[in-house]
Amino acid sequence: MKALKGSRTAKIFAGIALVSASALVIAGCSSTPSDDSSSGGDKPATDLTLKLGSLLPKTGSLAFLGPPMESGVGLAVEEVNAAEAGITIDLTAEDEGDTDTKAYETSIEKLRNADVSAIVGAAASGVSKLVLDGNVSAGILQISASNTSPDFTAWEDDGLYFRTAPSDLLQGEVLGNLIAEDGAKTLGIIYQNDAYGTGLNDALTTTFEGTGGEVVESVSFNVGDAQFDAQVESIKAQNPDAVAIVSFEQFKTIAPLLVNAGISADKFYMVDGNLSDYGDEISVSLEGAQGTKAGPALEDDFTDRLQASWTAAGNPEVKDFTYAAEAYDAVILVALASLAAGSTEGADIAAKMQEVSGGSGDGEKCTSFAECAKIINDGGTADYDGYSGDVTFDENGDPQGATIGIYKYVAGNTIERTN
């Protein structure tokens, strides 16, 4: 069972994968027994209605991540409800915006007033930091598919915060080692001055300099900035072997400035916040640029199901699937924990999150909600392994293992996975 209080220490394990992170949780309604049969088990012991909220970016600097995460949430809700396994999800979706637009201020109040038991989001670590304490006070479980700030590992959250994405400590390690392995001896970093940017800047700097390299310039900008000439000039003056850009959509402005300053794109190293198929949205070629983002290669069946569900609701096709799997898995894990607890109360769900993710070490492996729900309804312990990986929350609610993929830009400003 996940400890609900206490200090936490982030841990990075060797290689390309493992890190400790933070904890998330849910709050809600109580359950009523039912003898209805379902595909999720012969006799579901409960008949639950879980009020779930999503706080994801429809607008703002992370809006390009909204469709993959929203579609992941939507598909998971659809499949949980279709299983008829003793739990139904009632979803309320609101816009996160960003720390500049502050759309989250209105949205979070709407979600709390809707009496949601759990919230998937926010996408940005900076926004989560602004809403988490209020959610904890309200007994709402918060689970993010993309929060990567190391700060959440030690957050006083009463055990009500989880995340399916790994800490920036891991991505910074992988990216720093990649840059060093590519032969760069000097590095310039442009990063945004928020929880996400400063965390990655610190992790990247520590790793790269640990390999014997030197960060010759590190310059920041604020999330709402539109001009980046000063930062580019500072980087150009140091003439580094490589340039890391830690940003969100500001990259679309920064990239042409760097290229026009004589820094070729094959020196660029990017992160999950700006790694996307840009096509003609960026006026210069990104061919040769590289970047990292969490998650294993997705199975075609999952992406096909996701696209079908998303477009059936009248949405355009998802351009890329960054954090789609993590969002999908977040919903599945919350639903399974609620089912295992026989309750939609936040603390009850939180107490089962580690168990259903395999953290107890004695569960039966399963890879879909229906399969896992049948195990639970038949009296067993489910251990869900999802599309984002094994997940397996530690005592802090952080995923014990994660995969960081390495991507490279090819012609047409699209990315291909190389590792």
Image (tube, rainbow, N blue to C red):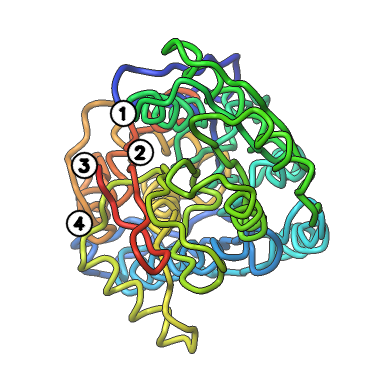
Alpha carbons under labels 4 and 2: distance apart? 27 Å
Query: Pointer 3: residues within 10 angstroms few (<14), some, or many (20+)?
Result: some
Spot occupied by residue 222 in the image (x, y as percentages of width and height): 79, 44
Residue at 58%, 44% in the rendered image: 346
Badge 4 vs badge 2, beta-carbon distance below 8 Å = no
Q: Is residue 367 left or right of residue 113?
A: left
**Neighbour class for label 4 at 10 Å: few (<14), some, many (≥20)?**
some
Amino acid type at circle 4 is Glu
Quarter of the image with the C terminus in it: top left
Q: Disc 4 designates what residue?
A: 371
Residue type beneath disc 1: Ile
Using the image, tell me which numbered label, if any, was put on residue 380. 3
Q: Does 391 sit above or below residue 275?
A: above
Which quarter of the rendered picture does the N terminus lie within?
A: top left
Amino acid type shown at disc 2: Ile
Mark 1, residue position = 16
Are circles 4 and 1 on residues that touch, CB within 8 Å? no
In this rendered view, identify the residue nearer to me: 220 or 329.
Answer: 220
Does label 1 or label 3 sit earlier along the sequence?
1
Nearest to the observer: residue 367 or residue 399: 399
- Residue at 66% x, 54% y is 257
Cα distance between the residues tagged 1 and 2: 6 Å
Residues under labels 3 and 2: Cα distance?
A: 32 Å
**Which numbered disc flags the more N-terminal residue, 3 or 4?**
4
- Residue at the disc numbered 2: 404
Badge 1 marks a residue whose secondary structure is: loop
Q: Between 224 and 262, which is closer to the camera in this rendering?
A: 262
Q: Is residue 411 above or below residue 294?
A: below
Q: CA distance from mark 3 to mark 4?
A: 12 Å
Question: Which of the two labelled residues, at mark 4 and mark 2, occupies the earlier sequence position?
Answer: 4
Q: What residue is at 41 percent from the left and 84 percent from the top?
A: 311
Residue 122 seen in this snapshot? no
